[in-house]
């Protein structure tokens, strides 16, 4: 085995969700994707086809993934407690920025 992807919260979801849920934390730490993204995508698509227009809907998937992460913090711990508060609060600005960008689209 060369690598293992732990999806953390297994959900039955469209391929777009599974793809972005993995890509965002592992391959898109900054504005530019890491060089390993292209081989990952090729491998992903060899197992499960990605929908057309996937990259055009990136912002919407980012929002879904961020909100899902906050919900997971809440569900796992029966509420967001002191140990999770900093992580949850750190997601507030990115969620707001992505949501504003989606709202401002033509």
Image (tube, rainbow, N blue to C red):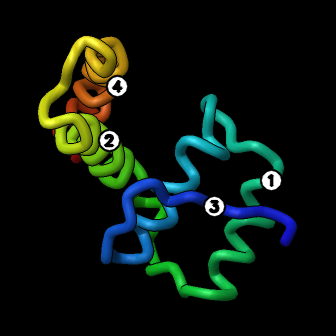
Which residue is disc 2 drawn over? 69
> Which is more N-terminal, label 4 or label 1?
1
Which residue is disc 1 drawn over? 36
> Which is more N-terminal, label 4 or label 3?
3
- Spatial separation of the CA atoms under disc 3 and disc 4: 24 Å
Between marks 2 and 1 in the image, the one whose residue lies nearer the viewer: 2
Which residue is disc 3 drawn over? 5
Q: Position of residue 87 (x, y in %)?
A: 36, 20
Residue 75 falls in which quadrant of the image?
top left
**Circle 2/circle 4 CB separation < 8 Å:** no
The residue sitting at 38% across, 58% down in the picture is 9
- Spatial separation of the CA atoms under disc 3 and disc 1: 14 Å
> Which is more N-terminal, label 4 or label 2?
2
Q: Position of residue 29 (x, y in %)?
A: 62, 33
In the picture provided, is 41 more to the left or to the right than 98? right
As drawn, the label of residue 20 is none
Q: Nearer the viewer, residue 48 or 102?
A: 48
- Spatial separation of the CA atoms under disc 2 and disc 1: 23 Å
Q: Nearer the viewer, residue 58 or 21?
A: 21
Residue 57 falls in which quadrant of the image?
bottom left
> Which is more N-terminal, label 2 or label 3?
3
- Spatial separation of the CA atoms under disc 3 and disc 2: 17 Å
> Which is more N-terminal, label 1 or label 2?
1
Above or below, 11 relative to 100 = below
Q: Position of residue 20 (x, y in %)?
A: 48, 57
């Amino acid at each position: 085995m060369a690598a293992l992807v732990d999806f953390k919260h297994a959900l039955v979801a469209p391929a777009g969700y599974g793809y972005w849920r993995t890509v965002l934390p592992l391959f898109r730490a900054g504005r530019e994707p890491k060089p390993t993204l292209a081989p990952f995508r090729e491998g992903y698509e060899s197992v499960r086809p990605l929908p057309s227009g996937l990259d055009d809907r990136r912002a919407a998937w980012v929002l879904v993934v961020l909100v899902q992460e906050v919900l997971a913090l809440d569900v796992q711990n029966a509420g967001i407690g002191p140990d999770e508060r900093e992580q949850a609060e750190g997601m507030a600005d990115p969620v707001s920025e992505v949501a504003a960008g989606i709202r401002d689209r033509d």
